[in-house]
Image (cartoon, rainbow, N blue to C red):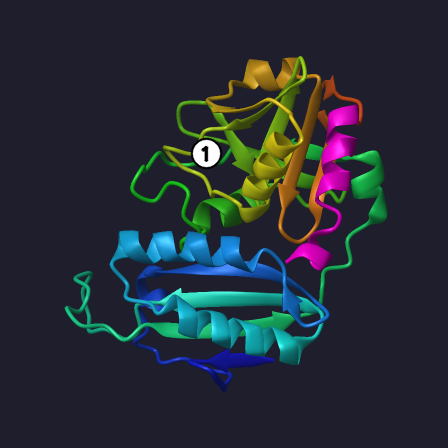
Amino acid sequence: MSWVDGRPADGLSVRDRGLAYGDGLFETMKVVNGLPELLDRHLSRLGLGCQRFAIPVDLVTLRTQITAFSAALGTGVAKLILTRGDGKRGYGPPVACQPRIVLMGSPLPDLPAKHREEGVRLYPCATRLAEQPVLAGLKHLNRLEQVLARAEWQDPAFAEGLMRDTSGRVVEAVSSNLFIVESGVLLTPSLRRCGVAGVMRDEILERARQSGIQCKIDDVSLGQLFDADEVFVCNSLYGIWPVRQLEASVWPVGPLTRKLQRLVADLSSNS
């Protein structure tokens, strides 16, 4: 199931700048019973990206399209791709552009329940994230660093991979954000240089603060990660997975991780 600019379609123009240059943004939304979860957060992040890229977008119209598409999809994953639209040869963006909106539907991934209950192992990726503050936090279409990082392992024993920036700081997982717990404080890496500001990351921070949990956003070193009391990763499709091992370091599935899993378990009824 796919729509282009609000209509059923299965192809794009070869002149689309998203294809040529990665000139665009995307959102991946979990849809349950026809309703997209965390839609406000997805649209807020997309709107920020459009402002930074100077891509004109009507978020009201976009919301209407996403809502209609989700209702038709039922339950699954709705991937939204928004590009600058068609352009001529060359990097220079057209002065007047007609953004293109692509919506693609797919079934929910069949993820092992044990990832949530028992935790996962992280692969130590060699691929580093380039430090580019202009793109930091955005979910832009250039995902080549993640593609290269995910290609580093095939062993199903690893459910995710740890990614650091070119200075060695811990940033995130390949397709997830990362949190650690230090003496009861919830800490997630700063994303001011690189990385994706995930909607589930923001949801967890908000719910944690509302519950009286002390939260912190700051640079995280590899040593801090290894010394953490608890570690978990999160994204909008699966919620929270505890991390039980990275290389020789092993962590328990701790009480704060379990509490946060419970706090975000009811997203479908609150979206």
Q: Position of residue 9 (x, y in %)?
A: 50, 86
Whether residue 140 appears in magenta in the rendering, the answer is: no
Q: Position of residue 40 (x, y in %)?
A: 51, 57
**Magenta segment range?**
255-271
Q: Quadrant of the N terminus?
A: bottom right
| Residue 59 position (above or below residue 71) | above
Whether residue 257 appears in magenta in the rendering, the answer is: yes
| Residue 32 position (above or below residue 154) | below
Residue tagged by mark 1? 128
Tell me the residue at 58%/15% (across/down). Answer: 224
In-image side of 222 versus 233 (left or right): left
Hey, which quadrant is residue 215 in on the image?
top right
Tell me if residue 136 can be seen. yes
Q: Nearer the viewer, residue 131 or 188?
A: 188
* Magenta stretch, main secondary structure class: helix
Tell me the residue at 68%/32% (across/down). Answer: 232
User: In the rendered structure, which amino acid carries the disc numbered 1?
Assistant: Arg
Q: Quadrant of the C terminus?
A: bottom right
Q: Position of residue 245 (x, y in %)?
A: 73, 26
Hey, which quadrant is residue 201 in on the image?
top right
In what element is the residue under mark 1?
loop
Tell me the residue at 59%/60% (across/down). Answer: 29
Tell me the residue at 44%/54% (across/down). Answer: 44
Tell me if residue 254 can be seen. no
| Residue 149 position (above or below residue 213) | below
